[in-house]
Image: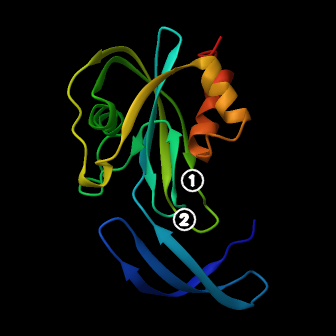
Amino acid sequence: MSKITQLDSQEVYKNYWMRVREDKIRRPSGAEGIYGVVEKPDFAVIAAIENGHIYLVQQYRYTVGGRFWEMPQGAWEQNPDAAPEDLAAGELKEETGLVAAKMTQLAYQYLAYGFCNQGYHIYVAEELSQQARELDAEEEDLIVKPFTLAEVERMIEAGEIRDATTVNVWGWLHRKGYLS
């Protein structure tokens, strides 16, 4: 198995949400080069399912200039070492006001490991009760809505849901029998 060796690393940008570094590297062939790496804390994505419905959220995504439906998800930059199940429960309540009596972890995936170290924990939330939402400032325009499973399937097939994480989780839900 070949391994790239890091020769040097320099932070080129940092803010509250991420750090970007540029590494000088040596490939197994001996050739040297650079590698840009985005470091972000892991996040949780939550499939909140109840009575044949799944809850999605929609907000304006500045980077792509549009509003899109997706499953509730987020990270705790102020507490990147939080237990994944606490993060999932916290993000679900924050964005939707939902509290789950049953949380099941399905998987852990990497978001885009070609340039970023961020991964995400996939949870299914069931036996839901409604409480007040606790939105962050960045989520002030967030909308939450339950959709039938058939509606979400149609939205994915029509390209209306463009969040790769949401589509990936949908595949996990099919595989694990949550959508039957």
Disc on res. 111? 1
**Residue 69 rendering spot, x and y as whole percentages:** 52, 39
The residue positioned 28% from the left and 48% from the top of the image is 140
Residue 22 locus on image (x, y percent): 52, 84
What kind of element bears circle 1? loop
Please tell me the numbered disc located at residue 162. Answer: none
* Left/right of residue 79 with respect to residue 57 in the rendered view: left
Q: Residues within 10 Å of mark 1 (few under 14, many from 20)?
A: some
Q: Residue furthest top?
A: 51
| Image mark count | 2
Is any atom of residue 30 visible in this view?
Answer: yes
- Amino acid type assigned to the residue bearing label 1 in the image: Leu
Number of residues whose C-alpha sits closer than 10 Å to that of mark 2, classed few (under 14), some (14–19) or many (20 or more): some
Picture quadrant of residue 83: top left
Q: Is residue 88 above or below residue 36?
A: above
Q: Earlier in the sequence, mark 1 or mark 2?
A: 1
Q: Relative to the observer, which residue lies in front, 58 or 86?
A: 58
Name the foreground residue: 36 vs 169: 169
Residue 142 vs residue 28: left or right?
A: left
Q: Is residue 176 visible?
A: no
Residue drawn 51% across the image and 16% down it: 53
Mark pair 1, 2: CA separation: 7 Å
Looking at the rendered structure, the kind of residue marked 2 is: Cys
In what quadrant of the picture does the C terminus appear? top right
Residue 137: percent from left, percent from top: 24, 53
Say which quarter of the image contains residue 88: top left
- State if disc 2 and disc 1 touch (CB < 8 Å): yes
Q: Which mark is residue 116?
A: 2
The percent coordinates of residue 31 (x first, y second) are: 75, 90
Instruction: Give the SS element for disc 2.
Output: loop
